[in-house]
Image: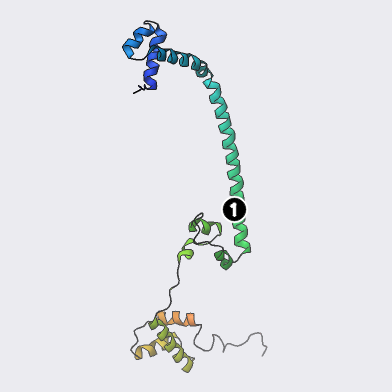
Amino acid sequence: MRKRYSATYKAEIVQEIFKEEKTLNELASVTGVHPTQLKECKRIALTGLPELFSRESKNEKTSQAYDTERNALYAEIGRLTTQVNWLKKNLASTLSRAERLALVERESAELPLCLQAELLSLSRSSLYYQAVAPSVAEVALKHRIDEIYTAQPFYGSRRITAQLRREAQVINRKTVQQYMREMGIAGICPGPNLSRRDHAQQI
C-alpha cells in the first residue's frame, strides 16, 4: 500500500533538505521517504516560491474586484428598493382593497404571506382571518328581534331588550344594539329640537 504524507510533514522534510545538514539518502533513512520523493518535494517547493512573493499583488487585485462587485450589488439593492417602494405606493393608491386581496397567492412557495401583505399594503392578520358563520341561537334571536321591530317599529334597544327578557331570553342591551346595527334597523322616533322655533322665520 502506498504511503501518504500530510502537507505539514512534507514541509518539515523540505526544511530539512534546505538546511543541507544531511544528504537525501540520510533523510530518506530517517524519514522513511524515498529519495526520489524527496527530490520531487524539493522541486515543488522551489517552483512555488515565486508565488509566495506575488501573493500580495494577487490579494490586492482580489480585494479591488470584491469592492467593485460589492458596490455594484449595493447600487442594485438601492434601485430595487426604490422600485418596490414605488410599486407599493401605486398599488395602494390605484387598486381597491378587494383587488389587492385578489392578487394574494396563498399557495405560493416563493413569497410568504407576510411579504405579500407588505408589498400589497395589506394587514397580515386579515389574510389569516376566516369569517365564522353565526350560530343557530344568534339567527333565531335576530329573527325574534325583527318580529318585535316589525310589530312595534318605535321600539328601541331598551324596549326590545325588556321584551326579550319577558320571554325568558338571557340577553343584555349591548347585544341587542349590536344585532340591530348588523340588521340595519333603529327605533323610529322624533329627532331632537323639532319643537324649537325657526329663528330664520320672522314673526
Expressed as whole percent of the image width and height from the top left, the position of residue 162 reads: 38, 88
Question: Image quadrant of residue 65?
Answer: top right
Spot the residue most to the right.
Answer: 202
Q: Is residue 152 something one can see in this rendering? A: no
Question: Image quadrant of residue 70?
Answer: top right
Expressed as whole percent of the image width and height from the top left, the position of residue 66 reads: 56, 32
In the image, is residue 25 above or below residue 72? above
| Residue at the (52%, 19%) spot, across then down | 51
Expressed as whole percent of the image width and height from the top left, the position of residue 38 reads: 40, 13
Amino acid beneath label 1: Asn
Horizontal relation, residue 42 to residue 64: left or right: left
| Residue at the (59%, 37%) spot, across then down | 71
Horizontal relation, residue 114 to residue 15: left or right: right
| Residue at the (59%, 61%) spot, across then down | 92
Expressed as whole percent of the image width and height from the top left, the position of residue 77 reads: 58, 44
Question: Image quadrant of residue 90?
Answer: bottom right
Secondary structure, mark 1, is: helix
Q: Is residue 167 something one can see in this rendering? A: yes
Q: Quadrant of the C terminus?
A: bottom right
| Residue at the (55%, 29%) spot, across then down | 63
Query: Which residue in the protein does label 1 denote?
Result: 85
